[in-house]
Image: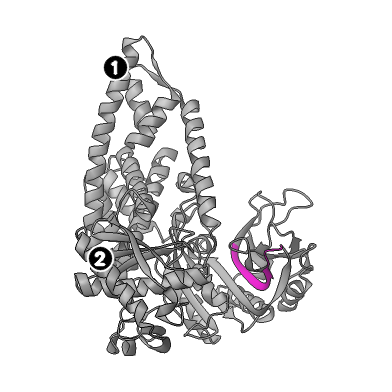
Amino acid sequence: MIQANDLRKKYLDFFKAKGHTVIQSASLIPDNDPTVLFTTAGMHPLVPYLLGAKHPAGTRLTDVQKCVRTGDIDEVGDASHLTFFEMLGNWSLGDYFKREAISWSWEFLTKELGISPDRLAVSVFEGDENAPKDTESADIWAECGMDRSRIFFLPKKHNWWGPAGLTGPCGPDTEMFIDNGKPACSPECSPACNCGKYLEIWNDVFMQYNKTEAGTFEPLSQKNVDTGMGLERTICILQGKSSVYDTDVFAPAISLIETLSGKKYGESDDVTRAMRVVADHTRTATFIMGDDLGVTPSNVDQGYVLRRLIRRAVRFSRTLELPEGSLEKIAKVYIDQYKDVYKELERNADKILKEFNLEVTRFEKTLAQGIKEFDKVAFYLEKSGNTSISGKLAFKLYDTFGFPIEMTVELASEKGMSVDIEGFNKAFEEHQLKSQAGAEKKFKCGLADDSEETVKLHTATHLLHAALRKVLGTEVAQKGSNITPERLRFDFSFERAMTADEIKQVEDLVNEYIKAGVEITCEEMSVEDAKSAGAIGLFMDKYGEVVKVYTMGEYSKEICGGPHASNTADLVSFKILKEQSSSSGVRRIKAVIGQ
């Protein structure tokens, strides 16, 4: 039976043999992208190159990208939802197009993975007023050997990707499915159904149009291919399992949870769900904190999501009666399981385990505070003769004090009281809608915005980094950045707040670099040569790869994908608005440049 490590290797080896360069997974923390908190797909770090920038590794790329998505966090524990996953992908940056992409997909599925053509089905774009019916893809599938009865034409809702924002690259896609043998739900049954007969395994996106601000679709001069195959879902299908949690991906962690809890996976729905949540959230938190740009638990942005994951894992570990220190032990299992593929996990192992311990300790204090608040609520209700805790009160305990609704129900039951769960759910849904509205606003500022102002602000982060290292010391290292057309936000490693004098020194230095008006140059070289030349940057495990090095006179030499201004003088001036804490050992600067 094929294992996860086998699939990962087979995929990369296959596309390497087809002339693709294997590139390392990008960080889980997006660089300079204000639209998302985490890398959510394989194409995410490659957007500048899909838009036309030259990639130093060439026009054919393949990798396995670490991804985090938390939009469905409350669904985790069912058969398929995960917060962390690995995405297998291959790209053509203006190189090959539909014929090669489809024929290689067919070859990999049927020859490399040994899937019978009778178990495969595909969907292609049916066409609309913006773009024609994709008969070309359908014909290529048929030439490969796909029976025409298993080729489905579906609308844009199912077979179109993008653009990522309101405008930009987009195009039809073709999706591949496994037919699990279930009877068709109706004569019209297709991969568009939710009946469970067809399970998606792979997606080839053909970026051949640009959506303009006017809403029209123009052909792109550089046509790209972007593909994505979820490793966990694919392994689940190949191993014939009914859940991703039943595969070898989660077997070591769940086995340890069984040992620590004295319970058996599958013995009841509640136990099974709790074990899945603990296994998933601990894995995700391990990867977030183990990333070289990894954050630590906090009350903002990525740190807030991380805190929620760990605390949710703690809650479910309590229902399993896991002993103290269990999450750290489970994290060690994941570090050992993935250390050969993602070397940063072993490199950052001490930090991962330390932060798990600290956050669990903090949460125990939060729970103690929550119990105090619950007791106050119960006391006044009992005094007034009320035996029901309103949904609004239950949500306040949850939202303000981080007190889980399950614990409110449990404690209320012990006192002979009830909880208005329907009212709690209503308050929770209203909270989610507000959060989603905020997220949509954030998303609308545009993925990989390459406007003139954003490019200048990106350039300013390099000068800021250089100035910080000169004033505070060379131990300062970038820990992330977030850029909108209005301002930059730069996170860096430093243990204390900067003094007013240090902030002024940094600001003055950046303005000095801008006033010097030096040309900004870019060279492509190996990572080893970049290090020898004195370039700084997140080297991770990119040895042997070719990278871009941007030099700004004698002030800054840094590995970066770009884009940048052509001269430091283009920035006009630089002003620090705020310096504050981001998370433990990480400071944050917000700044603007002149017009």
Judge by depth and name the residue closer to the eye, 410 or 477: 477
Give the vertical position of 455 relative to 95 (above or below): above
In the rendered view, would you say 298 is above or below 12?
A: above
Q: Quadrant of residue 220?
A: bottom right
Q: Tags 2 and 1 in contact by the CB under 8 Å rule?
A: no
Q: Is residue 135 magenta?
A: no
Q: Which mark is residue 379?
A: 1
Q: Picture quarter containing residue 262? A: top left
Crowding at dot 1, Cα within 10 Å, few <14 / some 14-19 / many 20+, comes out as few
The secondary structure type at the circle numbered 2 is: helix
Seen from the viewer's position, the closer of residues 75 and 171 is 171
Kindly identify the amino acid type of the residue bearing the numbered disc 2.
Lys
Residue at the image position 47 percent from the left and 35 percent from the top: 428
Does residue 209 show up magenta in the picture? Answer: yes
Q: Residue at x 30, y 25 (%)?
A: 374
Q: Position of residue 323 (x, y in %)?
A: 23, 44
Q: Measuring from the top left, give residue 211's x and y in whole percent.
A: 68, 67
Residue 347 in sight from this viewpoint: no
For the point 32% across and 13% down, the residue is 382
Which is the main secondary structure of the residues drawn in magenta? Answer: strand
In the image, the segment drawn in magenta is 201-214
How many numbered dots are placed on residues in this image?
A: 2
Whether residue 173 can be seen here? yes
Q: Nearer the viewer, mark 2 or mark 1?
A: 2
Amino acid at dot 1? Phe
How far is mark 2 from mark 1, CA to CA? 54 Å
Residue bearing mark 2: 504
Q: Which comes sooner in the sequence, label 2 or label 1?
A: 1
x and y percentages locating residue 463 in the rendered image: 34, 75
Left or right of residue 254: residue 99:
right
Secondary structure at badge 1 equals helix
Task: Judge from the rendering whether residue 157 lies leftward or rightward of residue 425; answer left or right.
Answer: right
